[in-house]
Amino acid sequence: MAGSRKRRGVAWRAAWPLLGVQAVVAGCGAPSRQTENQPAVVTVQKIDIVRRLRESGSIAPRSSVVVRSRLGGTVAALAVAEGDLVEKGSVLATLNVEPNEHLRYLSTRVAVLQDSISFALALEERDRRKQLVREGRAAADELDLVAAELDVAQATLELRRTQLRTMEEEGGGAARVRVGAADILAPVSGTVLRRSLEIGEVVRSAFGTPGTGKELFTIGDLGGLVVHCRVDQADVKYVEPGAPVQVAVEALPDACFQGAVERVAVAAIQRPEGNDRVEFEVTIALEASAKRLKPGMTCRIDLVLDEALRVLALPVESVRSSESGGWEVLNRVAESPIAVELGLRDENWVEIKSGLDEGDEVLRYPRAELGPPDLPDPALLGRIGTG
């Protein structure tokens, strides 16, 4: 058979749901308007067949950070609104620290001073014991106990200092927290995607329990947008990094955006018990020109999985399964079955690998004669495994 092919190893399957596509007359891309139960004549012709994955997804920034406060208090001032650009370390909001939080901070400062004294005394005691050992007035093994006490004092001091430093960094500096105020700072540079607090609102502390406090701000990098979508386990083996993707959004029906598969998850998405569907997340990087898109928009992706170029083909409704388990078409002249071997297919066309030549004419099977389900329903072609 003549014709060039570009393959990615997609196998033809022989058991699919019922097809409901109208016939396509040779040389014409529009559906044929045939009388019900009157066979249409179709001609074997050379065309390009493309098999696609179509899925829904959502647009998101390449990276985003949720900002919480590890100090509790009342919102005294807001420095940014949604959509503002911020630099790392810039002030997002200011809190009047809760009295209990302020007391905890002051107590930590006192503890640091006390632990510093304890460490200094332990260090002095170690040096004194060393001198006694050198003078022969103390046993050498006494140094082991003194050294252990010194290690404990040093570790306690370092822990307290870390707690104090964390509280001061969370509040925008020691000078601010010392007077009962706290500045919430931007941990990264980017765009404020969401602000979830107002002046006068009480913010509870998340100190000691990271990730559990209220989400105050979300900051994202809009310089690189991506699409997140989920692909069934039967399909994901055909999705490869670097594959080109077209992206369409309902909010911008006149536009089509380009992207490429960036990453295919190595592990399936965790599902609740009882949900046995296995899916993998696929990340698609959008081109920099997709500036009209916004995080949170839903979209449809169109990914070419396989294509056969300039191959012999027939409309899918011209083919049916044979009693031998293969596939057959109906000869136009003798109305007798002809066994054929099939290749790639899309929503409307199926490749004829053997059994017919270019220009041969066959009959489309009327709907009343379709019999058992044969070829796949085009509505299911978004699932690669059924296409």
Image (cartoon, rainbow, N blue to C red):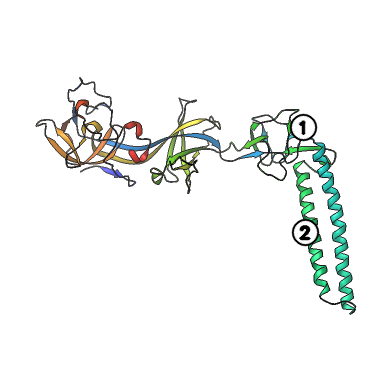
Q: Residue at x 88, y 67 (%)?
A: 125
Q: Residue at x 88, y 76 (%)?
A: 138
Q: Secondary structure at mark 1?
A: strand
Tell me whether the residue at label 2 lies in contact with that at label 1, contact meaning CB atoms closer than 8 angstroms.
no
| Residue 7 sits above or below residue 22 on the image | below
Q: Residue at x 16, y 32 (%)?
A: 362
Tell me where residue 379 appears, x and y as whole percent: 35, 31
Q: How many marks?
A: 2
The numbered dot on residue 386 is none
**How packed is label 1: few (under 14 Cα within 10 Å), some, or many (20 or more)?**
some
Which residue is the extreme one toward the bottom? 136
Q: Read off the residue under disc 1.
A: 74
- Using the numbered discs, state the Cα–Cα distance from disc 2 to disc 1 in whole angstroms: 34 Å
The amino acid type of the residue labelled 2 equals Ala
Q: Read off the residue under disc 2.
A: 155
Tell me where residue 91 appears, x and y as whole percent: 74, 36
Which of the 4 quarters of the picture holds residue 347?
top left
Q: Secondary structure at mark 2?
A: helix
Nearer to me, 128 or 273:
273
